[in-house]
Image (tube, rainbow, N blue to C red):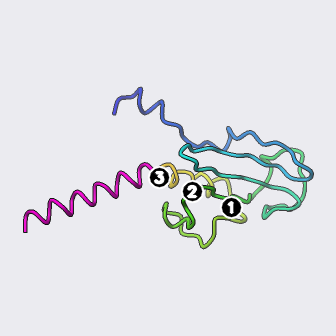
Amino acid sequence: MSWEDILKQKKFNFDNLRFTKENKSWAALYDFGEDVTFSIVAGSYSYSTPRESLEDPMEYEKYEVMLGHPEISEPQEIGIMENTMVFPYKTKEEITEYARKVEANLPSKLKQNKQKKNLGRLVDAFKE
């Protein structure tokens, strides 16, 4: 992979999120591509710390994150070991860590890995 290809790759950066204020909450939507999104919210009606409306969305200690994808029903499929698609009270660092897991396991990459595994099994079968 060339440096140009590496620079073209989209990487999650919490500081670049564009939050909008809706009622007494802040919300940002991050699109990973391939119909995978993070909805990140904080404020009075979300699982954030504090649970109140602040003037600056970057001042929260913890945020609520929801992973969205039409074909992914369990976050374990992409390497996040949580029980639901909503992750309450997550720090910026935890959200960034989750984003790295999502980036490494986008549906096309999962499909590619599955195809590689299937091809490996086929080759192994011929060796036997």
Residue flagged by tag 3: what amino acid is it? Pro
Q: CA distance from mark 2 to mark 3?
A: 15 Å
Q: Nearer the viewer, residue 109 or 101?
A: 109
Crowding near the residue tagged with mark 3, few <14, some 14–19, many ≥20 C-alpha atoms within 10 Å: many
Q: Nearer the viewer, residue 63 or 116?
A: 116
- Looking at the rendered structure, the secondary structure element under dot 1 is strand
Lateral position of residue 27 relative to residue 91, left or right: right
- Looking at the rendered structure, the secondary structure element under dot 2 is helix
- Looking at the rendered structure, the secondary structure element under dot 3 is helix
Residue 24 at what x, y percent from top left?
91, 53
Mark 2 or mark 1, earlier in chain: 1
Residue flagged by tag 1: what amino acid is it? Lys
Tell me which segment is drawn in magenta: 105-128
The residue under label 1 is 90
Mark 3 or mark 1, earlier in chain: 1
Crowding near the residue tagged with mark 2, few <14, some 14–19, many ≥20 C-alpha atoms within 10 Å: many
Mark 2 or mark 3, earlier in chain: 2
The label on residue 98 is 2
